[in-house]
């Protein structure tokens, strides 16, 4: 999938187009006015028309210079804006990568300490949860920062292997894959989608169990349901995924679900939510793939 042109490049293209059009119209206006006064002068021979010619020549030249200077300034500042954007993106990517490495090391050490302890420690468990949340927030920030230019791959992924990679993030959560499925998606993007949905069920839904179930949706698409046993969602379900909108007083910013919807859309899929018959919430993913 080819990424869309970044808005900073589009801004420079629009500035160049505006400059070309404005210069062309200004030059045409000046030439047209000079030709008209020259034709009238050849017929009447008035000195007033000669002064008008001089006025059109000087004022038209000044207008062209002003438009040219304004257009060059606009292009220059667009270039500076693009350069600052690229520098910030490069810094943010490097900073996020270094921070993720440190957090992964911290999580590994905390898991080793937890395994070697005779009795479980609530403080250590909270530390592990906070590290997982920080890692997920960094992943989300990195995806959002590269939303315009990030290129997603098309890979053949086995859902069982993907779920096995993610299961260690939530050791206390009963995470079960009922039906295996193979999908065509970007592995890093799909893992981010699943982590956001499972983390949302755990943190905001207080879920203890999450079931992943797959079914055939069409000839080339599968439907993957992520079903939790949490407290569900009492607000307007259509508002889920709206960025910076809090459907409930205790809900989050919505960036995680917004990012999940955006990534699935970029992979040719979609995401929606339904309430379970008994309790909890189900996230329904649609992707290209087939049942195993």
Image (cartoon, rainbow, N blue to C red):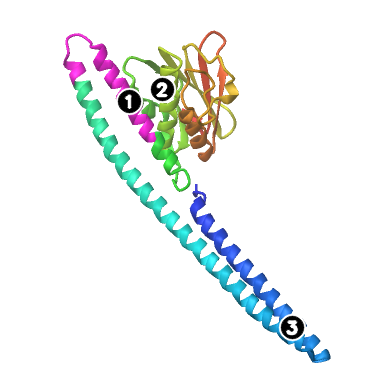
Whether 111 is among the magenta residues is no
**Residue 278 position by quadrant:** top right
Query: From which residue to which does the magenta span run?
Result: 113-139
Q: Going 44% across and 39% down the picture, which residue do you hit?
A: 144
Along the viewing direction, whichever of 152 and 94 lies nearer the viewer? 94
Along the viewing direction, whichever of 49 and 131 lies nearer the viewer? 49
Callout count? 3
Compare marks 2 and 3 and give the one earlier in the sequence: 3
Mark 3 vs mark 1, CA separation in Å: 74 Å
Residue 171: image location, x then y, percent: 31, 17
148 over 264 or under it: above or below: below
Determine crowd level at label 1: few under 14, some 14-19, many 20+ residues with C-alpha closer than 10 A: some
**Residue on which disc 3 sits:** 35
Secondary structure type for disc 3: helix
Q: Going 43% across and 44% down the picture, which residue do you hit?
A: 146
Q: Going 23% across and 28% down the picture, which residue do you hit?
A: 106
Side of 177 relative to 7 (left or right): left
**Residue on which disc 1 sits:** 132
**Residue on which disc 2 sits:** 199
Report the predominant secondary structure element of the magenta stretch: helix
Q: Is residue 168 visible to the viewer in this orientation of the structure?
A: no
Residue 270: image location, x then y, percent: 55, 32
Secondary structure type for disc 2: helix
Residue 130: image location, x then y, percent: 31, 23
């Amino acid at each position: 999938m080819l990424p869309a042109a970044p808005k900073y490049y589009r801004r420079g293209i629009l500035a160049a187009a505006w400059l070309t059009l404005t210069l062309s119209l200004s030059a045409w206006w000046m030439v047209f006015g000079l030709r008209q006064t020259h034709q009238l002068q050849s017929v009447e021979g008035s000195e007033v028309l000669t002064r008008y010619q001089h006025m059109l020549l000087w004022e038209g030249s000044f207008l062209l210079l002003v438009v040219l200077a304004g257009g060059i300034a606009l292009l220059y500042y667009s270039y500076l804006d693009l350069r600052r954007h690229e520098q910030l993106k490069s810094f943010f990517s490097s900073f996020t990568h270094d921070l993720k490495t440190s957090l992964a090391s911290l999580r590994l050490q905390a898991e080793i300490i937890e395994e070697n302890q005779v009795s479980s420690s609530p403080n250590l468990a909270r530390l592990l949860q906070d590290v997982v949340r920080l890692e997920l927030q960094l992943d989300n920030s990195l995806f959002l920062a590269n939303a315009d230019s990030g290129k997603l791959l098309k890979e053949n992924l086995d859902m069982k292997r993907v779920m096995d990679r993610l299961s260690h993030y939530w050791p206390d959560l009963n995470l079960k894959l009922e039906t295996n499925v193979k999908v065509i998606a970007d592995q890093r993007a799909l893992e981010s989608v699943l982590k956001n949905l499972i983390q949302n069920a755990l943190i905001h839904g207080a879920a203890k169990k999450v079931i992943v179930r797959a079914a055939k949706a069409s000839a080339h698409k599968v439907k993957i349901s992520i079903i939790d046993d949490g407290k569900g969602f009492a607000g307007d379900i259509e508002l889920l995924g709206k960025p910076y909108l809090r459907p409930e007083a205790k809900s989050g910013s919505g960036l995680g679900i917004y990012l999940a919807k955006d990534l699935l859309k970029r992979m040719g899929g979609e995401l929606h939510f339904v309430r379970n018959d008994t309790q909890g919430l189900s996230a329904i993913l649609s992707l290209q793939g087939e049942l195993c």
